Amino acid sequence: MKKLTVLALFICLLFSCNKDTKPLSFKTTETTKIYNADINVLLTEATANNAISKAINTSIKNEIIKAISDSESIKNLEDALNEFDTEFVNFKKYFSDRESTWVLNIESEVTYSSSEVLTIALSIYTDKGGAHGNDTITFLNFNPNTGRLFTLEDIINDVVAFKNLAKKHFKIAIDSNTSENLSIEDFFFGEPFQLPNNIGFTEDGLVLLYNVYEIASYNQGYTEFAIPTDILSPYLKVN
């Protein structure tokens, strides 16, 4: 998954939580504001006016704000986007000879839904005129009945056993994707295998994704692999 693609403007997800729970529905909107920098946002949000939807939407926006702003005073997404744009304008004042434009692309997508778990992936690309931009993907796993973010321990019943399983699938993935005879330690800068920060559900199973720079070199790009659901079942608390 090199880049997230929003396949439809409206994504309706039905959860059989209980008889009183209304279906969660999502829509994707594109920012229409014109900025000085090249800023594009395709944001998927829950549409219902209830506590669950508000909790999900707040977590999504907070993750974006954390990724694009270092200011603790920024509390909403619009302010974070304006801050990025203002930084670019100020940059151009001092470096007017630079022809490059700063770029910020944000996309979000629902990658999986069930009555027990909802996964939303965020793709954030920033380029402030350096040698290359910074491209990251973040998985957010939610409890669809509360809107609360799951931790790994909420999803996996035995993290140590799961790590051993993931290590085997990681080795299979790197062996199939490179002709070089590389060990696991080559990817982790001499250290033993570690689980990635980003683990999320898709229709292919559970995807484990290392962003650029987290392991190996920049040229390696993303490193990701999926563990099929049928293999995962004994390790999962939710599915």
Image (cartoon, helix red, strand yellow):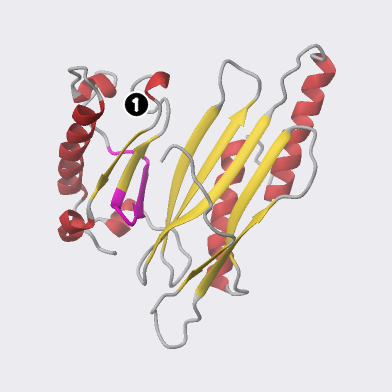
Front residue (pair 139, 111): 111
* The N terminus: image quadrant: top left
| Residue 136 coordinates in the image, percent (x, y) | 49, 36
| Residue 143 coordinates in the image, percent (x, y) | 41, 65
| Residue 236 coordinates in the image, percent (x, y) | 23, 59
Using the rendered view, name the quadrant where residue 115 is placed: bottom left
* The C terminus: image quadrant: bottom left
Q: How many marks?
A: 1
Element class at badge 1: loop
Is residue 69 visible to the viewer in this orientation of the structure?
A: no
Q: In the current view of this chain or complex, which residue is farthest to the top?
A: 97
**Vertical comparison of 70 with 18: above or below:** above
Q: Residue at the spot x=47%, y=82% of the render?
A: 21
**Vertical comparison of 100 with 52: above or below:** above
Residue 198 lies in the magenta-colored region = yes
Q: Residue at the spot x=15%, y=41% of the render?
A: 164
Front residue (pair 144, 6): 6
Residue at the spot of label 1: 215
Q: Residues within 10 Å of mark 1 (few under 14, many from 20)?
A: some
Left or right: where 126 falls relative to 141: right
Front residue (pair 83, 177): 177
**Vertical comparison of 179 with 145: above or below:** above
Range of residues picked out in magenta: 195-206
